[in-house]
Image: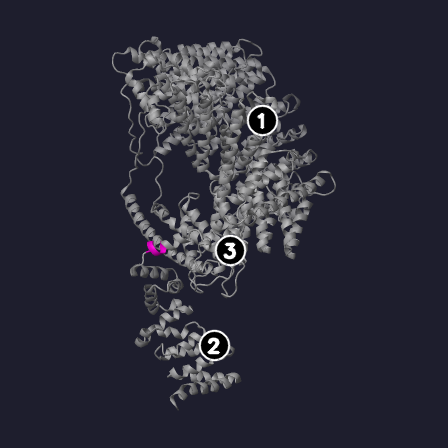
Amino acid sequence: FTSYKMTSISGGSPGVFFSETVGHLARSLAQIDDPPWNKVERLLRLCPSHSSSDPLILTCRGQDAILGLLIFLRESKLKHKNRLVPYFLNVVNALPLAQWVPSSSATLKPDQSSCQQFVFHLVTMLLQVATLDISMQEEILLSLLRLLQSLTETAVEETSASKVFQVVVPSLLGLCGAIGVSGNKELLTNVLSDVTGVSRKQAGDTVVLLKWRMDLVESVFKEVMRLTERDLLAKLDLQLTEYLTNHALPVTILYKSVSGILTVNALLMLKAVIQFQDVHAISCAGTVQALVRGLLSSCRSELHLERSGKGAELSVSQQLKRKVQAVCVCIEIEVWATTNEADAVGLHQTLSSLLNSVGGKRLDYAHSPLRSACIQQLGQLAEMWPAVAGEVVQTLQTFLTSPSYVLQRLKQLSGSVTGESAKAVAEKKAALDAKFVELRNEAIDNVCRALRVGLKTNGDFVQAFLVSIGNKLYTTHSRDQQMTSSNILITLGRVGCTLSDTPGAASSALALLQQKLCKPPSSFDTLIVDQMVQMAVKAEETSWFQVVDEFTRMSMEAVTAGYGYGPAHGLDYKSCSRAIMSGLEYIARHTSDQNKLQELLLRVLELFINLALEGKKAGDQTSGPTKASSSAFNLGLLLPVLSATVHQMQVIAQPKLRLLKLFRDFWLYCVVMGFAVEGSKLWPAEWLSAVRDVAAKSPSLLSAGSEQYLGRDLMYGSALRNDNVTAAELTDLRSNLLDLLSGSADLIAVVNKLTAAQCTYLMSAYRLESLRVSADTKSFKYVFLYLEDKGIQKDKAGMGQCMHAVADKIFQQFVSLLEQKPRTRQTELELESHAHFLVFQFNNLHKRIQRAADQYLSTLVGKFPHLLWSGSVLTLMLDVLHAMSQSLEDKAKKRQAHEISVPGTALKLVFPEDDSARERLVLDFAARCGEVIQEAVKWAPNQSRSLLQEYIARLELNIGGLQHHTGICLATECAVKYAGLNHLAQAQKASVLEKLPECLKQDTSQFISKLMLRTRCLGEVIGMKSLVSSDSGISAKCITQRLISQLDEAMVAGATEQFTVSMFRATALLVATEADAPNPELLRAICFMPMKLFTETAMQSATACWEWLVSVKPEFELQLLCCIVDSWLWTVNHQLGAFSPDVDDSLVPNTQPHNILTKFLVERYDVAKYKSADQVELYCHLLHCSLGVGVRSGNRSKLIQAPISRHVSAVQTRFRLLQLGLSIVQGDSIPDGVSKTLLRERVYSTAFDYFSVAPLWPVSESHALREDILSLIKFWQAMQSEKRHLKAPMFTGLLAPPQAEAGSTAVSPQRIMVSEGWMNTMVLSYPRHSGIAEKTISEQAHSIKSEVRGAELIKLYSKKRTLILALVANEVERLSTLYNPLGLPDQAIDGEEVVLQWRSTSFPQSERIWKEFVRLAWQMSPHLAVHMAARFPNVDAVKNEVTAIVSVHPGPVSDVVEALRFVVTDQNINRETPALTHLLCWCSVPFIIALSLFSTRYPPHPLLGYYAARVLRTCSLQEVLFYIPQLVQCVRYDKLGFVSEYIEKAAGQSQMLAHQVPFQTFLMLINEFIPLGM
């Protein structure tokens, strides 16, 4: 369908769009299990319809619709077949008389390719339908046969050339081609994949080849005879020539001759219908044979005439290709039609002559398909007639070893290709080489086919062939000896692989190859090695061992001969040493049998050690100085082989002593030769990677059960004996070991006493385990095997101390690797498993191992603090403590050491036999558990308490909870001890809390109530689930829906208690689920319902339920956080709580639910930032959607404004979010980039946004006000630490140019210090600095610009940071004054003194800096600058600078009431500055401020008076009544009469005002004149 739609008749995008749409619709309908007919009928209505009286009209869209309907029928497994198949049969029957509508203008004829492809795809799909439904098969085949007969009759009798070549012939070609393709599975798969749009694999799985009925075969053959008659073909060619010559209009016919393409398609159709038939059962078999022979003879004659052509190029005409294809099909049919042995012999001669026929340069390439067909049919002929198998083998042997003319010509053509460009030459040469290899491989494959057949009659048939072809290796002296020898060697290898099940075949072939290998050395040695490798992998098992033995022997002899004392013939093997190593690596990668791999590992390790020993031996025997590097290269070549070998194996846990000895020596030489040094440039990086692979599967260098392992084996069994090491080399070993361990003075003294064997052993263990850890961090536990080894512990030379230093060094690397891992759930589980292991090792019998485990666990927790509040780790610790306490009380196990099993883990703990040691171990572990819980509660209080609640509740449900449980006791003790302070006690100082009893300050009641709710609701849910399992008619879905409806009802009713219980029930159902993912509806309900209710109690219940769910189901944490973020953003979009709009300062928003939620989110982030990058991304998304990227200025900047309310009651939510944002941008949870920079900008802007309004006074309670102040102080502290995080690289990285590709920059080589002795490959010191990549001039220039721009941004952010610190410190002081007006020490807030001290001492107070701050604030928001004067009233510089700026630019603050005083100044009024004109459009001010403009404070001015009068007119008269005395007073100072005019108008509107004004005027006159005596 794809190929068809691309050549759609319409030719434009509309046609392609329609065909794609129809195809998508058909495939979509096919995917429906039971597609309704009304939808399928829509597709049918797009197809053309016809009747008996009207012909079928086929437009482009009609063809697309028909094929789309066929796609639906096949892909839907014949749904609605009874309605659709009859329609398709009607279309087939109507095709001979169909009318093909042109695609565009009337001048264009119908496209031939469109007609042909439509018929081709239509018939192909119908044939597939016939294979899927046997009941419809006969009807479909008969319809196609009638179509074939009708088209053939029309081609014979039709005189209209236009109809013949535009419709009839293309339809015939499409029909014959479709039937021909139906017999070839590969071609049919490709066609179906194109038509249906599925992959090749999916199409191939559904392909079924069709077997035609006998009578239909004979009918098809009759039509083939008519189509291949010479008269008909000659007539059609003549008509086509005349048509093309005389036709005036442009035509779209893609061929100039019909005979060739029609003959090929007819023969392909014939081959498809007869290939599954028995030749003896077909009555027309003789006629078929006669027809094919006649066509074969005719085509051969025509090909013979082509030899006179002298074309020098490789281009081949379409006519010649058709003739070659016709001959190939004729050969295949004639082989099928062979009925006796005599015919087989004659056909063999014919095929041999065709195979070895001679042609010109052009024909040799064009006849390649013909030669390929001859080779294939020779093998087929041998399988059909075993009597000719010998002759077939001889023919193909001659073809390969003579060699054949065609092989010679292809090789010559490949060497003499010329062209216009190197690319064209390379493409032609590659095509010729590929054709040569294809013919050679086909010949060898068919030789194997014939040999297998010949074995049935002659058991020595294969041996005779091998001897015959093997002799030719030594007897051939032709000029093409290179080609002949290569063909023989490849044939030997292929026969050995293919006929490996034949006795003696593989061994004989392998023996012949071995006889020729390096005897003498030649260019064929690499090819021989390759064939031997293939035989080792594919042939019998003995061949595998023979090849491996031969390769290891040759490698050893080649190296020893190179040193001068091995066998002389070993030098002959050096030419193929690289090929041998590659062959061994290939064998290792393609061997799956574990026994073979074990044997190969032994062989290669022995070879490695022997080569190293021989190298050292050669160095000792030479008089001059020798280096290890001279022999290390031979060893390095074996490293990829070892890597490939162990890659297929499991970790070698318990090796035999021989294998262990080999591994010890292997790692010793890896240390000596420098193969295992990370970052070394001495050897190729691939070798280090190979050594790392070996380390991942290598066993530990320890002997099980040997307590004197080091004392005996290191002295006598080491490959590097102490007496073979010079004093200088021993000094180098010790210094290298000290450089690795970086030990203390005590360690230096110990190392300086070690022998060479001990030093190399320690370095080997270090290199092995460090590489093992770098390959897989889960393998760190192997380090403790060395620490627990009794031989190392009892060694008197200090090996135990050194091994602990090695373990410390490896642990540092291990932690570094863990830090580099992505923060995912898999990494979290791995960290927990390491913590489990270290918890067990903390209780080891040996004190030194206990201290090491304690140190490692502390370091691990320091790097990954979330392990402290991990439920898995906490549960394991308490369970281990309980198991130890039980063993302590078990009298049956007194006075004997025994193992303790802990439920839920495979690790076991060995308990000592001494009672005092047991008690001490239990006491130490219990104390350590308490310390861990204390730290966990300190850093993640809610999470840790939730885990303790879950641990107690989980065991409470078990029967064990009725008995004594040490873990529960400790958990309960810690829960009571670290329950935390209640919200009232949190507002008190420590000195006050000391006087209060525990019941008044502890929050134990909340812990108990949550625990009771958990157990109660979990028990209820378990009861509900038991009803579901008992087949009571209640489904799990019903329970879920019921709980959700209860939650919704409680939310709508506002029933707080019912809502809390419903929340816990819903959470209990999620906790009790055994699925891998939570129920999405239930999860969404427990996140959104509290937001919709939006009360303090609802949010407290929600956070408690979320903590419960996370503590029990940590795998649900990411999905839960997604829902929480969505629900948070829902409150943002609906402007609830802290996101309420700033309408009126008197309206206090309900921010307490958001305060609770932000407190929960901040703590959850502190937990998540260490373990989950996905959760950090969600927090970033929440902040990006909650924080604005600009500072609000009135009604402007609405697109960038922060949605958080600027009311003082929302200060806690705002600054907790800002603190969270700073935690993210200051940490490494997300990389430096646009997201982090934008988040930092949002934090700064949202902080400034709070101060862009006039200061408000809170109305909350004291404890809430204390929380507000604490949130401000914590944000201030975080902002103060921002200074060390503002670095230029985080900004220059955004401006840097794209990095160059790997390998494009030159890196300075690493300086490596080496020893002067034999061990010159050992790295004696590590490089402290790596090479610096050189930069181009343009990169340097861009880097300089980026650094300058980065420095400017750092300066800007530093100014913003200081201004934020000043504003927040001012707000802390203002709110603290309200909270603690008397400054009582008991009510002081932690951190308050630091803030105030910074403001008084560290904050710069110069006038210049204050002016810079005001200008900076004005740039961000003029409102912010105006309100700075109110927040810093004692700083004259602020007031003066604001006045100066507003006087010049009053427009941006014309909507700010407080800004009026900076415009209406004596200076501006006296000078009549232009700023006063802005009073005409200034916002209204309170009535009393407007009256003050008429006082003596301001000089009279018309604009000022006009503005004040306008404000007076906007005020309500009810408000004016309170200010009548002041209003009357203003008449005295109003020289312009604005107040008098206002009084007159107001008196006319209010009688009360009209009566009050004269009265107040009279009182004013009395009070003024009576004292004067008037």
Q: Residue furthest left?
A: 624
On the rendered image, what quadrant is the N terminus found in? top right
Looking at marks 1 and 3 on the same chain, the residue that comes earlier in the sequence is marked by 1
Q: CA distance from mark 2 to mark 3?
A: 42 Å
- Residue under label 3, please give it: 1263
The quarter holding residue 693 reads: top left
Q: Residue furthest right?
A: 1032
Left/right of residue 1102 with respect to residue 673 in the rendered view? right
The correct choice, above or below, for 449 with respect to 30 in the image is above
Could you tell me residue 642's position as x and y percent?
43, 21
Residues rendered magenta in the picture = 1398-1403
Give the position of the C terminus as an image quadrant: bottom left
Choose mark 2 or mark 3, whichever is in front: 3
Distance CA(mark 1)–CA(mark 2): 88 Å
Look at the magenta stretch and give its main secondary structure: helix
Between marks 1 and 2 in the image, the one whose residue lies nearer the viewer:
1
- Residue receiving disc 2: 1514
Circle 1 sits in a helix, a strand or a loop, which is it?
helix
Give coordinates of residue 1098: x percent, y percent: 59, 53
Residues packed near mark 1 inside 10 Å, few (<14), some (14 to 19) or many (20 plus): some
The numbered dot on residue 887 is 1
Identify residue type, mark 2: Thr
